[in-house]
Amino acid sequence: MRNAFIDELVSLAKVNPNIVLMVGDLGFSVVESFQDQFPDRFFNAGIAEQNMMGMAAGLASEGCHVFVYSIANFPTFRCAEQIRNDVAYHSLPVTIVSVGGGLAYGNLGYSHHAVQDYALMRTMPGMLLAAPGDPLEVRACIRYLAAHPQPSYLRLGKAGERSLNQEVPHVRPGIWNCVTKSCQSNGNAFLTTGNGLQIASSWLDENKEQKLDLYSLPLWGMGTKTIQAQQIPHDCATLYTVEDHLIDGGFTSWMLESLIEYPNLISKIRSRALSPDVCAAVANQNELHCLGGLKFF
């Protein structure tokens, strides 16, 4: 996902002189292609993420679309006040790029477990969450964000995620992307965002007798609840929400909130989210997923 991000950003920066990339003294071996081609639009703010977010807001106030790139919790929780007051409050075109969402940096422990980021970022008025599930959705999300500059949060994986879409999909906020459709699903479906798409797809690969539709929601935010709920058929069977995030304040909670006017659909939601057990654990991503309860079968 990281490589898809920087490749797409470079392509867009060639035609959009307002695109700026800012990093917090990391991303090397990934960001050099942007740095080499646009040295005047690349800034290394050092290990000073709060200052970096303030700088990004200042550049955005002068017409730049700033992509702020850092690891997991560093550009989110560490910068929460700057995001809230400087970026979201002023509706500035800053895209906060968090690489290593979920438990991708599991071996580095709780400081790097990004399992509460949805809960934080979705409470920011005007903030659009971009949680692509594969490299092709990464490209689609960046294209949308570049065409619609606004406060946004882009959550990326880093574990060599597979391309599950057949082509770059057309994405819009609150619109579900149907990744696979089964003629024998009987209305059973996975509803995913971010790395939940990879997790659900692997379950289907391992258990081919299971027939479920697979949907991804790459773009969502405060303004999308109604539209995303309206697209769910009322005669559906079981809906499994899948996320590499704690259930509290995460994607499942988001879906339940969006379905508040549809109690018949709420009763069909079954959550597959992480338990708090992962917070105190150090292990690789797959081991932490098992520990946290991300097992379907």
Image (spheres, grey):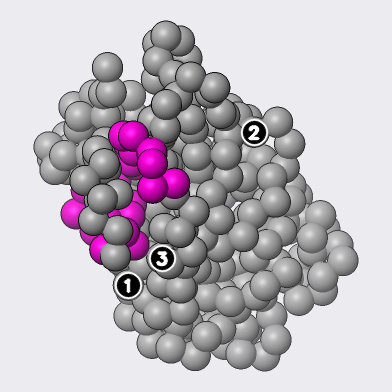
Q: Name the kind of residue labelled 2 in the image.
A: Asn
In the foreground, 235 or 206:
235
Number of numbered callouts drawn: 3
Which callout, 2 or 3, points to the residue nearer the camera? 3
> In 3D space, how far apart are the residues under numbered discs 2 and 1 (Cα atoms)?
29 Å
Residue drawn at x 38%, y 41% as measured from the top left: 235
Is residue 121 inside the magenta stretch? no
Crowding around mark 2 (Cα neighbors within 10 Å: few <14, some 14 to 19, many 20+) is: some
Q: Name the kind of residue labelled 3 in the image.
A: Lys
Query: Which residue position is annotated with label 2?
Result: 165
Name the image quarter holding residue 290.
top left
Query: Mark 1 and mark 2 in contact (Cβ < 8 Å)?
Result: no
Whether residue 38 appears in this view of the structure is: yes
| Secondary structure type for disc 2 | loop
Q: Position of residue 32 (x, y in %)?
A: 70, 50
Which callout, 2 or 1, points to the residue nearer the camera? 2
Mark positioned earlier in the residue sequence (3 or 1) = 1
On-image quarter of the C terminus: top left
Q: Which mark is residue 123?
A: 1
Left/right of residue 131 with respect to residue 178 in the rendered view: left
Please determine whether, in this image, residue 160 is positioned above or below residue 25: above
In the foreground, 181 or 292:
181
Q: Position of residue 233 (x, y in %)?
A: 44, 46
Q: Which residues are magenta?
A: 233-260
On-image quarter of the N terminus: top right
Query: Which residue position is annotated with label 3?
Result: 225
